[in-house]
Image (cartoon, helix red, strand yellow):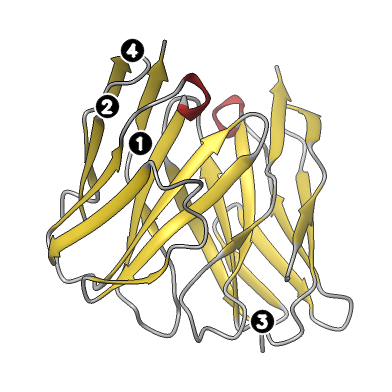
Amino acid sequence: DAGVIQSPRHEVTEMGQEVTLRCKPISGHNSLFWYRQTMMRGLELLIYFNNNVPIDDSGMPEDRFSAKMPNASFSTLKIQPSEPRDSAVYFCASSSGGKTGEQYFGPGTRLTVT
Amino acid sequence: GEDVEQSLFLSVREGDSSVINCTYTDSSSTYLYWYKQEPGAGLQLLTYIFSNMDMKQDQRLTVLLNKKDKHLSLRIADTQTGDSAIYFCADLGSGNTGKLIFGQGTTLQVKP
């Protein structure tokens, strides 16, 4: 299996621009999680989906952030407009939803907003 | 809310054993996990333990769970320079939501 796939791996953009991060979960997994990692705040859960439905978006920092999962094999995290404080590494993870609950992480997207 | 705590840094000599500790607050925890993050990479699942177990061994890794004290540890035997990374402890809680609560991560430095 290819594991969780994220694109792009690196993104540099200017303040005010729209940024879209993409994720392909492991085939057959029905739960998908978006995390943000920074030195200051560590690893934060932003939002997660079960069977393509958003379950908990309480970690989404502001209305500038939105996430979608149009089908079982694709999800996007969008930031519009982006700000320098959004600079971080964004991870996507997926889980089979079984009782053991383990999550498998993608390689991350390093976002720099100048 | 529920919380997971780890010490931030551990330094050991190559060949020694490393013990990374974690405490959690959720008394209804079902599964607990250890993840490893190398520089520039995502989190890699190392192992997990069911809350009814008190020990799990996998090659050089030994996980100990003291459910009464809500204390989890990861022992790495014969630590190598390739083990240098950040190690995260995570708690599934009751499992109803599928969410993991992560600790802050422990940076393991292995000196040659």
Asked if marks 2 and 4 fall on the same chain, the answer is yes
Q: Name the kind of residue labelled 2 in the image.
A: Arg
Q: Position of residue B4 (x, y in %)?
A: 74, 61
In-front residue for pair B56/B3: B3
SS for tag 1? Answer: loop
- Seen in the picture, residue A81 relative to A66 is either above or below; the reply is above
Q: Give the Cα separation between the discs numbered 1 and 2.
A: 6 Å
Residue linked to disc 3: B29
Q: Position of residue A56 (x, y in %)?
A: 44, 69
Q: Are marks 1 and 2 in contact (CB under 8 Å)?
A: yes
Q: Give the Cα separation between the discs numbered 2 and 4.
A: 17 Å
SS for tag 3? Answer: loop
SS for tag 4? Answer: loop
Asked if marks 1 and 4 fall on the same chain, the answer is yes
Q: Position of residue B45 (x, y in %)?
A: 46, 55
Residue linked to disc 4: A14
Q: Give the Cα separation between the discs numbered 1 and 4.
A: 20 Å
**Residue occupying the point 38% across, 24% down:** A111
**Of the residues under marks 1 and 2, which one precedes in the sequence?**
2
Asked if one can make out residue A12 in the rendered structure from this viewpoint, the answer is yes
Q: Which mark is residue A9?
A: 2
Q: Give the Cα separation between the discs numbered 1 and 3.
A: 28 Å
Q: Quadrant of residue A25?
A: bottom left
- Seen in the picture, residue A39 relative to A55 is either above or below; the reply is above
Count of picture labels: 4
**Residue occupying the point 66% across, 83% down:** B51
Asked if marks 1 and 2 fall on the same chain, the answer is yes
Q: Position of residue B17 (x, y in %)?
A: 76, 43
Q: Quadrant of residue B12?
A: top right
